[in-house]
């Protein structure tokens, strides 16, 4: 068993890697919202900013980076605060601040706006950024995550969703979740990605890549902190205020993607998020896919995303 305090992996060698097939991306750091963020960039054109979820880092978008760049977009995948090659700050893991990280990166890249594409926690933050800083968000695409208000309601009132999202409740314990994530060279990370996927299972190289990234010192703790805030703040003034802020409707075209076999975020929980969108909203359910549709069937996911991004008038 690996001691959680042992620095068994270092960010540069683990995070700044090439894409499958040897396709090279540009790795660099950008400053935003008082911290430093690692990005992987490919292509030229309108900016598409890709936001990963748990327990992953920018590399989860490896297929979409290539597809988007080949389709004429500037594709940028960032590591969220505390993950991958980005800064691990002692504070700042509430969704409002994490959303400011994202819009700050858009500004630091010298762009007037971006199409945000978020999965899982990245999707939660993409919803938040679109509501908080609408002028910086051109379009919004979210995978495997309902609107924050819908997420809160489902986790509190739907017994099946509460059970499916039991890992979130487990994260509320101090230190134990971090040790579980890091035990046996982060074996749990591999199990989570496999268990949450559908029949199209990830290969061992993919699982090992995520396990190595989780073993970078402090990553496990920082990865869990947003979920601790999401639960512990529910009855606190800051959480109540955030929930009220999320009443503000999203006013940009929105694409909502979901796997029909997602075991941790039920389709019923995600569906209905369109009530918070006062703009064209498109719901796409991928049959036979789990929690990671962008990895389980990257061609179908990328095709759907690119066609929607290129559609000048996305309909409902």
Image (spheres, rainbow, N blue to C red):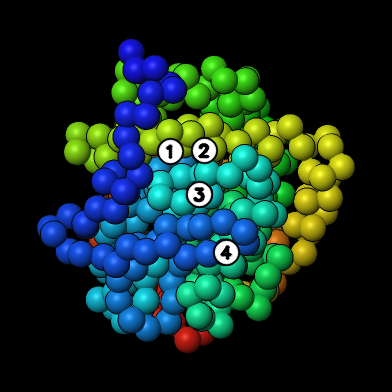
| Spatial separation of the CA atoms under disc 3 and disc 4 | 11 Å
Q: In the picture shown, does residue 269 fall above or below 235?
A: below
Indicate which disc residue 223 carries.
2
Q: In the picture shown, does residue 176 fall above or below 223?
A: above
Q: Is disc 4 in contact with disc 2, using a CB cutoff of under 8 Å?
A: no
Secondary structure of the residue carrying tag 1 is loop
**Upstream in the sequence, badge 3 or badge 4?**
4
Q: In the picture shown, does residue 151 fall above or below 140?
A: above
**Upstream in the sequence, badge 3 or badge 1?**
1
Q: Residue at x 71, y 65 (%)?
A: 132
Image location of residue 184, percent across then percent down:
32, 18
The residue singled out by tag 1 in the image is 55
The single residue placed furthest to the top in the displayed view is 1
Q: Is residue 3 left or right of residue 295?
A: right
The residue singled out by tag 4 in the image is 32
Image location of residue 224, percent across then percent down:
55, 34
Foreground mark, 4 or 2? 4
Foreground mark, 1 or 4? 4
The C terminus: image quadrant: bottom right
Q: Is residue 106 left or right of residue 132?
A: left
* Mark 3 crowd level (few <14, some 14–19, many ≥20, 10 Å Cα): many
| Spatial separation of the CA atoms under disc 4 and disc 2 | 19 Å
Indicate which disc residue 87 carries.
3
Q: Residue at x 67, y 73 (%)?
A: 134
């Amino acid at each position: 068993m690996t001691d959680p305090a042992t620095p068994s992996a270092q960010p540069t060698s683990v995070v700044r890697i090439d894409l499958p097939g040897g396709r090279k991306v540009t790795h660099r750091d950008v400053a935003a919202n008082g911290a430093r963020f690692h990005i992987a960039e490919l292509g030229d054109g309108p900016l598409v900013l890709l936001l990963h979820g748990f327990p992953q880092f920018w590399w989860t978008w490896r297929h979409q980076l290539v597809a988007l760049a080949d389709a004429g977009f500037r594709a940028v995948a960032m590591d969220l605060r505390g993950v991958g090659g980005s800064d691990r700050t002692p504070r700042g893991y509430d969704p409002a601040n994490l959303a400011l990280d994202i819009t700050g990166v858009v500004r630091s890249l010298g762009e007037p706006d971006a199409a945000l594409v978020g999965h899982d926690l990245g999707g939660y933050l993409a919803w938040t950024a679109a509501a908080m800083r609408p002028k910086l968000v051109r379009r919004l695409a979210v995978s495997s995550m309902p609107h924050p208000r819908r997420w809160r309601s489902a986790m509190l009132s739907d017994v099946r969703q509460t059970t499916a999202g039991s890992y979130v409740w487990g994260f509320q314990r101090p230190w134990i979740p971090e040790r579980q994530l890091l035990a046996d060279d982060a074996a749990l990370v591999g199990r989570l990605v496999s268990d949450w996927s559908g029949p199209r299972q990830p290969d061992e190289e993919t699982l090992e890549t995520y396990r190595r990234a989780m073993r970078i010192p402090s990553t496990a703790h920082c990865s869990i902190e947003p979920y601790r805030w999401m639960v512990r703040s529910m009855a606190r003034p800051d959480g109540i205020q955030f929930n009220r802020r999320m009443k503000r409707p999203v006013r940009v075209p929105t694409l909502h993607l979901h796997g029909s076999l997602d075991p941790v975020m039920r389709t019923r929980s995600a569906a209905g998020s369109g009530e918070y969108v006062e703009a064209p909203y498109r719901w796409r359910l991928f049959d036979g896919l789990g929690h990671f549709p962008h990895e389980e069937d990257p061609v179908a996911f990328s095709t759907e995303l690119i066609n929607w991004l290129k559609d000048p008038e996305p309909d409902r």
